[in-house]
């Protein structure tokens, strides 16, 4: 059983929409009491902006807020209408953290929420839904460093808009090994007439997204993703593993198909990650993936906040087709008939 609430109206935040003013937020007189800012017609009090959240990089809470304000035009369409699970780090990446599915009761009244049925809790949970810039800045202001979303929209929770393959390397395999596997996934899916779009995990792997037409259910997408992973493992057993057991993953890449589930979330594109430095789960081009595989160098796939802002300014939103492209999903039997050789 799932909720069918009215989908909140989503809009693209224009690049000129005002964000919080960092210089004012950094005034010593405002560091403890907070500074009041106006964002998209909403008033917010931002506190402790000078607190260092990423010690290795000297990246502060103010920098986190600033990043999310500046990336918002690209990010917000990917968050709009989706239940958000927050991953909060009140003391920064070296401190404790916690996941928060229930939208905090202290949220501003204008933050959208959506009721989603939880089998585990046997009740509806009110999730935050970040549709606009004020809501995004509020989330950043409560130290939600990582944004984890459903593959579905809240109003159609059983109908994913995309399939995801999470490529997770088992040492000594690394992101370059993930590139090798990503190219195999692309080859297989192309033979099924499906386009797939890569992004970094912001950690040590890659994630591949297959946009859909909005009709398939998880009962279709999960078996399909599993079949893809199985075909890849059979064809390349020294490189690919589809089973979760850690002792099977040494030197291989796990093609994690299990994220295609209504009860799971995946880190959003353009989300910061809680690593030593402020890396981002960022879209990359297939040319970049091919280059990393060819040169055996993956440093160009480690992108920090400043890098991603420059890339979006220069290249736009490379992940926009994940929102706009419509593709029909073949059955898992079709996957089994595909030959990779």
Image (tube, helix red, strand yellow):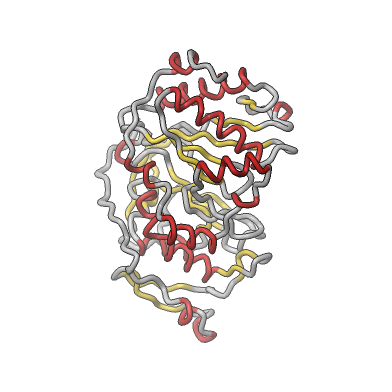
Task: Give the residue displayed 57% in from the left and 55% down from the top.
Answer: 303
Q: Quadrant of residue 182?
A: top right
Q: Residue 168, position in %: x, y? A: 62, 37
Q: Is residue 293 depicted above or below 189 in this figure? A: below
Q: Quadrant of residue 315?
A: bottom left
Is 307 on the left-hand or right-hand side of 299?
left
* Farthest bottom residue in view: 29
Q: Residue 320, position in %: x, y? A: 37, 47
Q: How many marks?
A: 0
Quadrant of the image containing the C terminus? top right
Q: Residue 308, position in %: x, y? A: 51, 58
In front of the other: 39 or 90: 39
Task: Give the residue displayed 63% in from the left and 64% down from the top.
Answer: 54
In front of the other: 12 or 143: 12
Q: Residue 56, position in %: x, y? A: 68, 65
Quadrant of the image containing the N terminus? top left
In front of the other: 240 or 155: 240
Is 102 on the left-hand or right-hand side of 203?
left
């Amino acid at each position: 059983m799932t909720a069918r609430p009215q989908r909140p109206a989503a809009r693209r935040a224009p690049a000129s929409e005002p964000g919080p003013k960092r210089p004012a937020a950094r005034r010593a007189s405002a560091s403890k009491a907070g500074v009041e800012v106006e964002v998209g017609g909403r008033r917010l009090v931002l506190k402790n902006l000078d607190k260092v959240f990423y010690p290795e990089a000297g990246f502060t809470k103010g920098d986190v807020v600033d990043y999310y304000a500046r990336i918002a035009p690209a990010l917000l369409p990917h968050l709009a209408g989706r239940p958000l699970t927050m991953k909060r780090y009140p003391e920064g990446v070296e401190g404790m953290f916690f996941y928060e599915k229930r939208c905090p009761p202290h949220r501003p009244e204008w933050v959208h929420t959506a009721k989603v049925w939880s089998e585990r809790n046997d009740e509806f949970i009110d999730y935050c839904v970040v549709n606009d810039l004020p809501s995004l800045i509020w989330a950043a202001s409560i130290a939600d460093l990582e944004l984890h979303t459903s593959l579905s929209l809240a109003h159609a929770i059983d109908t994913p808009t995309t399939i995801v393959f999470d490529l997770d390397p088992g040492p000594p395999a690394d992101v370059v090994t993930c590139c090798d596997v990503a190219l195999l996934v692309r080859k297989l899916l192309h033979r099924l007439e499906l386009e797939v779009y890569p992004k970094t995990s912001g950690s040590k792997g890659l994630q591949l997204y297959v946009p859909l037409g909005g009709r398939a259910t998880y009962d279709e997408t999960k078996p399909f993703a599993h079949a893809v992973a199985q075909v890849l493992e059979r064809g390349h057993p020294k490189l690919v593993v589809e089973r979760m057991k850690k002792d099977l993953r040494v030197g291989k890449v796990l093609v994690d198909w299990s994220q295609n589930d209504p009860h799971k979330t995946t880190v959003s594109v353009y989300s910061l990650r809680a690593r030593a430095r402020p890396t981002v789960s960022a879209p990359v081009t297939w040319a970049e993936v091919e280059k990393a595989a060819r040169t055996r160098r993956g440093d160009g796939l480690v992108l920090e906040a400043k890098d991603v802002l420059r890339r979006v300014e220069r290249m736009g939103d490379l992940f926009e087709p994940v929102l706009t492209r419509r593709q029909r999903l073949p059955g898992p039997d079709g996957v089994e008939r595909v030959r990779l050789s």
